[in-house]
Image: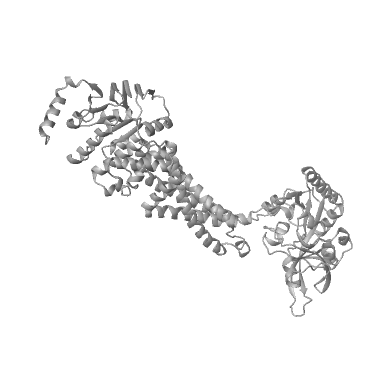
């Protein structure tokens, strides 16, 4: 019967092309607006590391005190001092942990025909590769021993490996960073979590894939400055050594805590550490620490742009208005066929069969609306850059899942909109309808 | 075949109750051709819609083919309508978007019949009413008489035990009406039970038995001079 009902539905749609066009456009526009804004929202609200997001934590320690944190609603600074980061690394209370910071490096290619170029690199600890599940094309990350020895080793990204070594296995070869050679120990597969959860404060959540990673200890030893934010509440003094001993916050820190018990213990540890700093006279306030996992951290950092949330809500409202219009149009369309419904009921159609017939007709409208919606969504996604920052706009793509979702939403929304008109159609009393003829 | 006992149908509003049928009793045997007559508003069509399970009744009993129908649900009533009853309406009630073939096919679709059997039945029914060659035509392309023949073919295609006709010639001219009536008589001779509501005393006179309804009740025709007068007038005006 499905084919029969579909055939009837398509015939009915062809009979009133203008009405059909109105409904298809209403659904298409509503769905396209929703899907376009959803494509942005989806990209920005994505869980970048779902398999571990509940195990990776950002610790925060209030080293500035209540006067400074007052402006931040009592929250500790978003980044960490060198002192705290090194102390936390030394204590090793997490399964794995890393301090990290971005630096700008000049790469001098071995190929004399290539000009030097700049890349953002990250200095972090060996644990980071395992913590962040970074996949490798060749080799692997460096070792904890190489962290301790401040080794001149590096992991490069696949794109950089393509550029410098034509994609060949470059493990064991050297790469010149800022005029110094680093031995390549691994080539990472393309790794570009969106949002860039591991360094939200310096990227606003969105950036190109990082192509160079070097040991944190080596970067500090070479007094490589951060290319990210550096916030101070007092004058840090002069020179590198004074700066890293200052209360300026400029480092990210991640701890891997696989269980809730471990996370609770780490919270206690952070408070204990802060209390210790208070006793030592560094902090003149009670411990004020936080420990947030990936999802909580991204939420706290408001990685999803406010305009993405607002535009999604507005477009969903627009879809609702389109659906209400569709309800009216479907109602008019279906009730004009009361006489047909009466005849069908008289000839043996149950109410259920009338329901199914008209819902299938509505689904056909939804399908057509979905196709129109898909075309408009394609245009909308191309035009996202008019509203959002380029870094965010480029994340909005019309991929297979969005195509399927667009069609699904169009069909489901139309079928939902058809429930009331269909219910009314199924309530047609055949006796009255036939008598009135 | 059809037996109504003390049946009543009341339409209620907030202020008034209107009896469409009151203490209504009728018994139609299998194979009978019964004409139901009566003035406008007497309850003829209400009787027919209740007989055809298109409407529920307020009180009394109704047995159709031995089954008490008052407690049946929508699915069961629909199934009986589909399998046991054929309808012929004054306004033909063909679906304008469907061609003749597809119109006749409608009740067979709801019966879940396979395509080859549907085709056999449809073509047989259309041949029987002389419209096999018009299978691909749409109702708007047919005359009133032809449309009514299609409606009869639709009713016959499902081989119903009971044929209910509501003023089947009401919208037709005399010649077309005669053709339709002859078709109904032929169908009856082949064994179908027919209940026909009509205003037309001439048509009523061609049925095996007449039932007269006044004010929602069956009355004895012998006691109603209005009926005899109407029949007399009809015959006097008939072209013989």
Tell me if residue B198 can be seen. yes
Dividing the picture into quadrants, the one containing residue B225 is top left
Which of these two is toward me, A38 or A285?
A: A38
Dividing the picture into quadrants, the one containing residue A423 is top left
Dividing the picture into quadrants, the one containing residue B29 is top left
Relative horizontal placement of residue A129, taking residue B217 as reference (left or right): right
Which of these two is toward me, A374 or B212?
A: B212
Which of these two is toward me, A263 or B227?
A: B227
Relative horizontal placement of residue A111, taking residue A367 as reference (left or right): right
**Residue in the image at 83% along x and 72% along y:** A180
The chosen color scheme is one colour
Tell me if residue A424 can be seen. no
Image quadrant where one finds the N terminus of chain A: top left
User: In the displayed image of the protein, which residue is found farthest to the bottom?
Assistant: A113
Residue B212 screen position, x and y as percent: 22, 25
Residue A31 screen position, x and y as percent: 50, 53
Which of these two is toward me, B194 or B166?
A: B194
In the image, is residue A377 above or below residue B174?
A: below
Residue A112 screen position, x and y as percent: 77, 80
């Amino acid at each position: 019967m499905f084919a029969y009902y579909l055939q009837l539905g398509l015939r009915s749609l062809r009979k009133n092309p203008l009405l059909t066009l109105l409904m298809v456009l209403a659904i298409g526009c509503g769905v396209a607006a929703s899907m376009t804004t959803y494509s942005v929202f989806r990209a920005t609200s994505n869980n970048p590391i779902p398999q571990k997001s509940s195990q990776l934590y950002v610790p925060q320690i209030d080293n500035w005190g209540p006067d400074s944190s007052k402006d931040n609603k009592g929250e500790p600074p978003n980044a960490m001092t060198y002192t705290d980061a090194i102390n936390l690394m030394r204590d090793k209370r997490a399964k794995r942990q890393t301090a990290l910071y971005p630096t700008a490096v000049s790469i001098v290619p071995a190929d004399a025909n290539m000009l030097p170029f700049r890349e953002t690199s990250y200095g972090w600890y060996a644990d980071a590769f395992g913590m962040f599940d970074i996949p490798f094309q060749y080799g692997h990350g460096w070792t904890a021993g190489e962290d301790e020895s401040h080794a001149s080793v590096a992991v490069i990204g696949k794109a950089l490996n393509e550029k410098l070594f034509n994609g060949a296995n470059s493990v064991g070869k050297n790469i010149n960073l800022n005029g110094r050679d680093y031995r390549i120990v691994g080539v990472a597969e393309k790794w570009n979590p969106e949002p860039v959860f591991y360094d939200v404060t310096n990227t606003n959540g969105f950036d190109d894939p990082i192509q160079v990673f070097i040991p944190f200890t080596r970067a500090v030893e070479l007094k490589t400055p951060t290319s990210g934010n550096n916030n101070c509440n007092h004058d840090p003094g002069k020179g590198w050594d004074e700066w890293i001993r200052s209360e300026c916050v400029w480092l990210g820190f991640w701890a891997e805590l696989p269980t809730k018990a471990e996370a609770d213990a780490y919270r206690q540890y952070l408070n204990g550490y802060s209390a210790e700093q208070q006793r030592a006279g560094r902090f003149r306030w009670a411990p004020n620490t936080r420990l947030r996992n990936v999802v909580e951290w991204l939420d706290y950092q408001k990685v999803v742009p406010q305009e993405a949330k607002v535009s999604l809500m507005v477009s969903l409202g627009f879809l609702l208005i389109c659906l209400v219009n569709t309800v009216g149009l479907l109602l008019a369309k279906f009730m004009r066929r009361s006489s047909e419904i009466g005849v069908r009921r008289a000839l043996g159609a149950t109410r259920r069969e009338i329901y199914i017939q008209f819902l299938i007709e509505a689904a056909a409208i939804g399908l057509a609306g979905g196709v129109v919606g898909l075309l408009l969504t394609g245009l909308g996604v191309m035009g996202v850059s008019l509203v959002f920052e380029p870094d965010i706009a480029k994340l909005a793509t019309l991929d297979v899942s969005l195509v399927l979702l667009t069609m699904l939403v169009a069909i489901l929304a139309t079928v939902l909109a058809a429930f009331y008109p269909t219910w009314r159609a199924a309530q047609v009393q055949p006796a009255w309808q036939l008598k009135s003829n | 075949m059809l037996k109504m006992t003390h049946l009543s149908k009341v339409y209620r509003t907030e202020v008034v109750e209107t009896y469409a049928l009151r203490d209504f009793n009728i018994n139609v045997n299998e194979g009978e051709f019964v004409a139901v007559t009566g003035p406008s508003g007497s309850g003829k069509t209400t009787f027919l819609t209740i007989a055809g399970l298109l409407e529920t009744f307020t009180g009394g009993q109704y047995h159709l083919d031995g089954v008490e129908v008052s407690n049946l649900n929508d699915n069961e009533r629909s199934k009986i309508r589909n399998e046991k009853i054929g309808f012929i309406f004054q306004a033909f009630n063909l679906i304008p978007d469907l061609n003749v073939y597809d119109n006749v096919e409608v009740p067979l679709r709801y019966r879940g019949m396979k395509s080859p059997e549907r085709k056999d039945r449809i073509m047989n029914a259309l041949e029987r009413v002389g419209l096999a060659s018009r299978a691909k035509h749409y109702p708007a392309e047919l005359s009133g008489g032809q449309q009514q023949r299609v409606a009869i073919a639709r009713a016959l295609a499902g081989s119903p035990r009971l044929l209910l006709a509501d003023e089947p010639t009401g919208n037709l001219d005399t010649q077309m009406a005669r053709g339709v009536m002859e078709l109904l008589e032929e169908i009856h001779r082949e064994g179908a039970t027919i209940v026909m509501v009509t205003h037309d005393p001439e048509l009523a006179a061609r049925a095996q038995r007449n039932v007269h309804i006044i004010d929602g009740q069956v009355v004895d025709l012998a006691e109603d001079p209005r009926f005899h007068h109407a029949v007399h007038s009809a015959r006097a005006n008939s072209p013989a």
